[in-house]
Every structure is written in structure tokens, then in C-alpha cells.
Amino acid sequence: MNTISDKELFNLVAGDDQRAFGEFVERYKNRLYNFIFRIIPEKEAAEDILQDTFLRVYNQRKNYSPDFALSTWVYTIALNLVRSELRKRKLRKYLSLDFLKEENDIELPDTINPEPGRLMPLLEKAIKNLPEEYRTAFVLCDIERLPYNEIAEIMRVPVGTVKSRINRARSMLREKLLPFKELNYELSKGLPQALCLY
Amino acid sequence: MNCRKVSRKLSVYIEDDLSPAEKLRIEQHLKDCSNCRRKAADLKLIVETASQLEHVEPGAYFVNRTLCAISQRRSPREILTSWRYRMTLSGVAFVVAASTTFFVIGPSATMVVQSPAGQTTIQAEMTPVIDSSTTPEKGFPVSDEALKRDMALSETPKSDSLNNEPETLPRQYVQPVSIKQKAKSDRVF
């Protein structure tokens, strides 16, 4: 079963093969969880959304159209659930008047350490602070490494919009990380020679 | 090409997803503009770092938990067509119909009571009886009879003797006053 393609595997799932569905969950759980966790960075909430995604995939298994890529379909379901959760949270936040509090932005570290690895936690925090549509586009493109056309199908926007959102997301991240550069934490210092443009 | 236009294309440029002509124009601008050059380097570093971010994974028992949840839950179509669902639905419909009938028509039943002698049976129709004498009409807080009674009480002239009670006054309004008390009150006023 490990050697068959995703579509062949899903044909077995559509034929009510429980073992095939177990294999399908194994194949998709990590990348989907990583995607959901980057948008909603809470382990339990992300796992719940991931489980709901698989339950929805299983319930809709007979409605899947092979014209679409399987991964696109699964990511779309996950994104819909993520957005629904974010809407609920927004409403809850509004009702509890938490929106009056200012959101914590990235905190400056006590000591400025110009190690390249130091950028990772700062970048993770900066990603969390991006608006949802930019965060989703950035995560799908730069973390999940999906092509533009697939991201456009998942987000249901034109490819041009995806490109501009990704560009905007990267620029916003740069703006958020610039203060560290100002404090002698130069982004390009940690860059390996091969990656330097000039 | 100005900085603004280059800035829009930089993201695609670092992914090498531009036409050769556009790529050349951007590279020419980057040679002359240190700001855009720095920005391109920073964006490239951000993309590289993002791709190296640690991939998080769900808990160890996630697959088992999901498969258990799937075996316990059924699709909405399966639920709708199941025998148990139909039985539950018809039960709920019956209860709703019965309660609607009860509230619209009202409780009406025939009660059969056997006399102590055990020979005769009495049948009684149990329908709600609305007593018009006790129920005040709409707009009047009290019934006519009670109103008349109160008016009669207020219009009755004060009499000196206790035996001179007005005939219209019901018994419950008469306060029993002893002769000694009466004499005392006469002295005060």
C-alpha cells in the first residue's frame, strides 16, 4: 500500500477501505498539521482541526472529483476549518472585549546575538503576527513549498493575488525583523556566501 | 525601472520565476540601488529561514484517535437513512402532535366513578369549567359582585347599635364588637 499513488489510495478510501484511510491519514497528517499549526499555533486546537479535516474528508470521500489534485482538496478543507475557527475566536474575542487589549508584537531579546539560528524563533513569532490571508499564503508557499497555482486553488484567489500576497507577507516580515538588524543584528550577516546576492 | 516597481517584483525575482527580459531589468536596477539590493538579500534570507523551520507533528496517538472517531461517527446521509433515526423522528413527531392536540382542544375525559354500594356508576365529563362569577372581566380588576359588595359597605350609614346591620352586608365583613368596647369608644368620641 505504501507504493501506490495518492489518487489510487483515495480510490480505495472511496470504496470504504478502512486500512487505506489509515494509510491516507499517515501520509497527510504531518504536512496538514504543520500548515494548521502555523496558522493557529496551539497544539490541541491544531490537532482538533486536523481531526475534523480527516473526518470531513472521510464523509465527503464519495464527492471527491479527480479533476482536482487530492492535496489541493484536502488543504482547502483544512483551510476552511481553520478560517471557521478563526472567525469563532474573533467573535469570542469581540464579545469578551479582549480586542481592546493591544496584541503583543515581537519582543526584543535581552542580548543581541548575531547567530544565524537566532533568526528562526524571531521569524516564527513574526509569522504569527501576520494577518490571516498573508500568513496563509506565506505558509503554503515558503513552508509547505506548494506551487502558486495550487495555492491559488486552495485560497480561491487568482495566481496574481497569491503572488502579491506572498510578496507583501515577506515584506511585512522584513519590516518586523528590521529592528533587529538596526541593533547590529544584520540579517545578511548570517547568510552563507552562496546565498548572498551581491 | 524604479524602486517601487522593483519592490513588487523582488519576491518573484528571488524565486527565479521571471521572464529573462524582466530579470535583466531588475538586475540592472539592483546594481545601481543599494536599498533594493539589501531588500532582495533580506527577502532571500527570510525565505531560506522559513524553509528550514522545524516541522511540527501531531501526537503519537493521533492516527488511532482519528480512526476511532471515524468508526464511531457516521456520515449525515447514513444517519438520515438509518432505522433508528427514523424511529426517533416518528417518536418525536408523535409527541409533538399529542402535545399540540392537548393544548388546542384541552383536557376532556369521562371519569367513571363507582358508588360505595357498588351498584350504580356515575359518569362525569371532565372539561375545564370557567366560573364567570369568580373570573374578573377584562378591564375590571374585580368581579361585579365583589364591587357591589364593596360599594354597599362604603355607602352604609354608621349605626349606633350593633343589631342594626345592613342586610346587604355579607357576614364576613361584620366585626364582632362587645358592648363594653362599644361603650368605651362612645366615650372617647
Image (cartoon, rainbow, N blue to C red):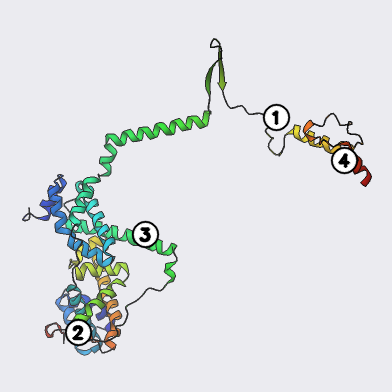
- Label for residue B63? none
Residue under label 1: B133
> Which residue is identified by label 3?
A88
The N terminus of chain B lies in which quarter of the figure? Answer: bottom left
Chain for disc number 4: B
Label 4 crowd (10 A; few <14 / some 14-19 / many >=20): few
Judged left or right of residue B163, residue A100 is: left
Q: Name the residue type under label 3.
A: Lys
Above or below B105: residue A72: below
**Distance from Cα at disc 3 to Cα at disc 1:** 58 Å
Q: How far apart are marks 3 and 4 (CA)?
A: 78 Å
Q: Mark 2 points at which residue?
A: A115
Q: Which of marks 3 and 4 is in front?
A: 4
Q: Which residue is drawn at 43% across and 34% down?
A: B96
Residue A84 lies, in percent from the top left, at: 33, 58
**Amino acid under disc 1:** Ser
Per the image, label 3 sits on a secondary structure element best described as helix
Q: Which amino acid does label 2 sit on?
A: Glu
Tell me which chain the residue with mark 2 is part of.
A
Q: Is residue B35 visible?
A: yes
Q: Mark 1 belongs to which subunit?
A: B
According to the picture, the residue beneath numbered tag 4 turns out to be B181
Cα–Cα span, label 2 and label 3: 39 Å
Q: In the rendered structure, which disc, 4 or 1, sits on the residue that comes first in sequence?
A: 1
Task: Let me know if marks 4 and 1 both belong to one chain.
Answer: yes
